Image: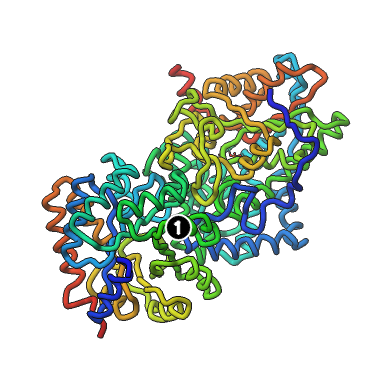
Amino acid sequence: MMHTAMSELEVDPLSLPDARGHFGAYGGMYVPETLMTPLFELTEAYESARKDPEFQRALDFQLREFAGRPTNLYFADRLTQHCGGAKIYLKREDLLHTGAHKINNALGQALLAKRMGKTRIIAETGAGQHGIATAAMCAKLGFECVIYMGEEDMRRQALNVYRMRLCGAEVRGVSAGQKTLKEAVNEAMRDWVTNVRTTHYIIGSALGSHPFPMMVRDFHRVIGEECRRQIMEKEGRLPDEVAACVGGGSNAIGIFFAFLQDLNVRLTGVEAGGREIKRGHHAARFEGGQLGVLQGAKTWILQDPEGQIDLTHSVSAGLDYAAVGPEHAYYKEKGRIDFGYATDAEALQAFQDLCAIEGIVPALESSHGIAYTMRRAREMSSDQIIIGNLSGRGDKDVQEAARVLGAS
Amino acid sequence: MNRIEKAFARAREENRAAFVAYLCAGDPDFAGSVAACRAVLESGVDVLELGVPFSDPLADGLTNQLAAQRALESGSDSQRVLDLVTAIREFSEVPIIFYTYYNLVFAQGSERYAARAKAAGVDGILTLDLPPEEAAEHLAACAKHDVKTVFIVAPTTPESRLERICEATTGFVYYVSREGVTGEQASMSESIQANVAQIKQHTDLPVVVGFGISNADHVRTVAQAADGVVVGSAIVNCIAENATDRAAISASLRAKMGMLLEGDALSKQ
Ligand SMILES: Cc1ncc(COP(=O)(O)O)c(C=O)c1O
């Protein structure tokens, strides 16, 4: 087991990123010239909104009344017993409106877009959770809404496609490449480059060019702030470890951020190990990835030695992506966030376990975090505490899980 | 004078704009790409922009995406792209500009990338997703290996950024004549003239205009305002439409070039 070697964090997490979006060597603004000025304007608009008590009040109100915050920090007693080690708590982001943590960010960015006078919203989605959160916000606030989604993801997350359409969103299938999240981001970027004057792009994870990784992180920080307070109330102490799945990294940075300075709390991001850690068969960027630049940011990327982006695979659409958010790359380098992975098979087992033992149907993305949390709890002692971020619910995955499990 | 300067000087002497043609390297395959380059170069091209195929061309429209896909599927890689330059150098001294995404440069390292490009006969590099703000290392490597840089100015670029962009540019400035990705379009923006004039207040280097130019009227309009006219998708489409028949590609490219240049379209009036 790796452990953080630092006695104190060398950097104030709030001082990152710098004015151009750098988290140390990672992040930045690697975009076509057309987007540079709109991104500067977005940064400015966000900075001004962040300082405006009126905006913060509106955000808090909607998070409470529309999204359903705060979410419970739930003691999973049966799961704890089953694993026979550390006490397992689950942060119930699955109970939020539209079914995942994604609404925190969609809500924040939609309010910001309103404030900026935009009339049209676009987004990419993998699992469809960010798409449905965005579509719901657009219905509520009266935006025209276009969601880009890879055709393979439309197939495996069909329920969410229909939900988005019910909320009035136009879902545009993307048939390029492997027809998953990366291609949907490419297509959303193309739309944005073309329509940037009227349109805001609500990116769905802590990814892309500055200011997105910072902004998305900030809108999700509420997860960790609540969680830290709740565990203090329930246990009178901090947990020994917090774990979360990492696609782009938004639910993970959201729950980790409040604990970054608590060096006794181990933070672990869980990537998608896919079928196995072999090129093209997984989406674990810290297992075989290289530093590179993709879709706006410098970060760890699954790619070949020439810089062509690798194919990826994960049973979960939301983790099936070749790059990781730049802030995670930074804290990985600093040794503050550790990374592991769960394979498709482990995630599917955790998916079934949580259903059978706790009566909770987790998203397949979240199931990767749960698989790790269970594995880790077994290694820990009964006086220790581990918190797993249950980033979303699995209604969307029931059909695909039945197909995959039935076939295997 | 380097090849880029010579090409624009010649056009100026002939009282016309330079013609900048874009093709994707390795499209539809290596031999077909050599033939396609030959066909356009023999039809009156002053500067050749070679797209370096990338798996995720997020600043490109469908035409260029499919071209990159054809090239990659036919086995294109960084060495084959350099081999193409070498092959072109056997029959042409046209200035060659790489049009690339930064990850392909970063993966090799800016130094190595610039050195290899220079050795093969490349004159300049345009990195689409590398703004001047992030380009220090790349600029130093290009300067060291005497490869010129090309940067883009967009309709969303405010005047306050022009100085920074022009400072980073050593080859020519590329003004994108509309917002959006590459592709043909029916009507041309009227603000081109004013925008080119504004850019020229910040640089003595040539200013070319591109993205969406697809017929002789477009060429004529842009030629009045700019030092060069860039045509990409209209040319690449000739390959897309004939991807299975190499002889037809060359004929189609020659016909398209004739159409684009019809009536002395490049000449300054
Ligand atoms: C429920 C759920 N969890 C996690 C993710 C992964 O995204 P991120 O790493 O940004 O949290 C997704 C993405 O679609 C998701 O739907």
The residue under label 1 is: B144
Q: Label 1: state its secondary structure.
A: helix
- In which quadrant is the C terminus of chain A drawn? top left
Ligand 1, what quadrant?
A: top right
Residue B22 shown left or right of residue B112 in the figure: left
Identify which residue, B1 or A42, lies in the foreground. B1
Q: Locate residue A220, reporting x and y percent.
A: 68, 45
Q: Considering depth in this image, is A290 or A328 the residue closer to the camera?
A: A290
Give left or right: position of B206 versus A103: left
Residue A53: where, in percent of width, then height? 78, 61
B110 shown above or below A400? below
- Three-letter code for the amino acid on which mark 1 is drawn: Lys
Front one among A303 and B113:
B113
Q: Position of residue B190 (x, y in %)?
A: 37, 78
Q: Quadrant of residue B92?
A: bottom left
For the N terminus of chain A, which image quadrant?
top right
**Crowdedness near tag 1: few (<14), some (14–19) or many (≥20) residues, C-alpha within 10 Å:** few
Which residue is located at x 46 percent, y 50 percent? B110
